[in-house]
Image (tube, grey):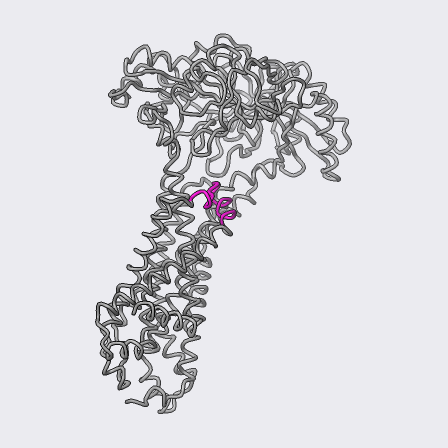
Amino acid sequence: MISKHLKSFLIHLWNNKLYSAITILGFSISLMFILLLSVYIKNEYGVDEFHEKKDRIFRLTHGKDAGFAPPSGALLMETFPDVENFTRTKYYEAYLQANGSSKVADNILFADSSFFNIFSFGMIEGNPRTALKTIGSAVLSKSLALKLFGELPELGSKIKMNDETSLEVTGVMEDIPSNTHFKKFGMIINFPTMAKVFNDDTFLNKYSHNSYGLYVLTKPKTNLSSKANEIFELYKGVNWMFKGGYAKSVELEPITESYFSTSHAYEVKNKSKRFVQVLTGIIFLILTLSVINYVNLTIAQSSFRSREVAIRKLIGGKKPGLLAASLMESILLSLISSIIAIALSFQVEPIFNHLLETNIQIINELNLSNLLIAIGFIVLIGILSGIIPAIKISNFNPIDVVKGKFRMKEKNVYSKIMICFQYLIIITLIISAFFINKQTTFMQNYKMGFEQENLITFENALPKEKQRSFEEILRNIPGVEDVCLTCGTPLDGGNNNCFTEKGKQYSFQVFRVDTNFFEILDIPVSKTGTAYDKEAILINEAAAKILNIEENPGEYELFDVWPIYGVVKNFHFRNLKSRLGPAYFKILPKDEYAWSFVVKMNGVNNQETLQRIHKAHNDFTDGTPVKINFFNQAVQSWYEKEERTGKIVKYFAILTVIISVMGLFAMSLYYVQQKQKEIGVRKVNGAKTHEIMHMLNYDFSIWVLIAFAIACPISYYSMHKWLENFAYKTELSWWVFAIAGILAFGIAFITVSWQSWRAAKRNPVESLRYE
């Protein structure tokens, strides 16, 4: 019985190709997004869950930062018996060489010997308990080991870092997995080795620099988090950052929550938990819309199958049997859509990974447990989608159907509310996509106050004794206009200096630059008339304002020893989320180490000039790799997150339009069926085709207008709140709302007009034959 019913259903699908295509395609696209988002969300919530001691590992933070001084961990362990162990971390970029091989640039993590006791990163060679015990010991990742040695090296092999520091390979570990909050690194080095690398034997005992990560492993059945206030008071007694009120609290963050932390550090990657929760909500929204639209389409089509159902009931078909058969149809349709959704997922996967900066692979999720979950999901969705149509179809009166008196009758309020709801979502998403794109374009085109074209910068890999010699080599390269050395550029923001001046606390960015820095970046400088000496500084206009010396900056001395030689016109050294702040500039002495080179090219043949710079650097540094950053590209990259967000909203808006068009098609078909008699009577009485179409379209247009009226204030409020994240923002222009409304009306008009035109052109005799 069921097999015959399913065969009849397949014939129905084949004979109604438009209905079948809309139903299956709409359902498949929805399930594709649900599948991709579900895998992504599962992976996001699974970050750092693989650590065996995850319940006892905590990262220390203070507000929005997570940097502590080197002695902080030892002091914590000495003071609180709850602490079993700790490790400090510091991210670093370096050049590595082994056995005369080519130099390789990679990211390094400095960490204490307890690192592998706390975290569960797999070791291939070496003893995890002792691998980082001695100064100069290093554990390589498998991929870096293969790059340096061509094979897994013997323990005890030597590596040279930055042509100066000698390291000993004491272990080889598996590559850092993607499901951890640590950024990818190729090697871990014993933490105290930093004193040797930076030629500073005292920094390990100083509280002056708070830029190191701190993780603790607590003893079982202890609650160190409850002692956060005591830890704060402990640090307040020894650390200037806590004494001065720059850090106002200490938090112990469970390692499984570090990925979603709002406390940032250079060595970790973070993701907004709210963003993942929004995606979770999107899954349920897509699923709800898809199920509702399937229900509406099935009910709208049920009148075309009413005669078949009536005959089955008249020849003895029972209601439970018809109900089960109808549910089987829905489950079959869900199965077909799911198979297509999986196939589509493989095609869309690269785009999805690019948008969300992830690396999900659907093929890796195809295992027995997930297969069973998928089967259960398909059956559940089939039942949820099919139960209402199944009940309605099984309740048909067969006598009315055979006599031709059957007509589906439902209250129109439900369908119209659904139209309003779906178009409310469409209009809100269109408005949001427009404003996110508008803000991104605004930021990308904003005048930052410094020249970006034909400017490049790269890290200084040379000792201070050689950097000025290489500067001269760069100057002599054809295509190079000018060169300067700096400690800080607009791209990295320089250093930060918090200080007290005349009883007030200030936070200034600090740049140490060559004298031609301002000319190269085309930043105007106004001299104050103060005679230049080696202690003189320049300040930006924001600093002059905050110090209240805009009228006579030349008469002021910072710290009573630094005369102000000039005032620099404001330029941005952070992205536009942050308001431009105060800064001061010191001239970089010729014999002082510089962080980076800044090169201005003439723009005639930049590609050829870059090749010459690469060659010059390679020859001068004996093959040290160089990573060149373009100023304009670096500034554009500041807003990649907003650009991706805009694309995500845009794609979701397109998906919602597809789902809503499917639903509107069903409702317009359903609506036209209910109006058949009225249309027939109007046509017999002389109504024109365009009048019939106006009558049918008008009703839908009213509800789209209502959706537009509701969507506008919702969109305005949400976009206003989103724009609060930016110090510099675009306007909430009225024309964006107008365009969104026009697009929504256009989508609705095109979708409904097809059904309206068919109904208006139908012979009225067909509608009134049995009246």
Q: Pick the residue in front: 629 or 52.
A: 52
Quadrant position of residue 469: top right
Q: Pick the residue in front: 236 or 132.
A: 132
Q: Pick the residue in front: 306 or 619.
A: 306
Quadrant position of residue 446: top right
- Can residue 404 be seen at all in this image of the molecule? yes
Where is residue 535? Give x, y as percent: 58, 15
Q: Is residue 622 left or right of residue 48?
A: right
Q: Residue at x 51, y 52 (%)?
A: 347
Q: Pick the residue in front: 427 or 758.
A: 758
Q: Quadrant of the C terminus?
A: bottom left
Seen in the picture, residue 686 relative to 602 is either above or below; the reply is below
First to last magenta residue range: 349-365
Seen in the picture, residue 152 relative to 437 is either above or below; the reply is above
Q: Is residue 363 magenta?
A: yes
Q: Quadrant of the N terminus?
A: bottom left
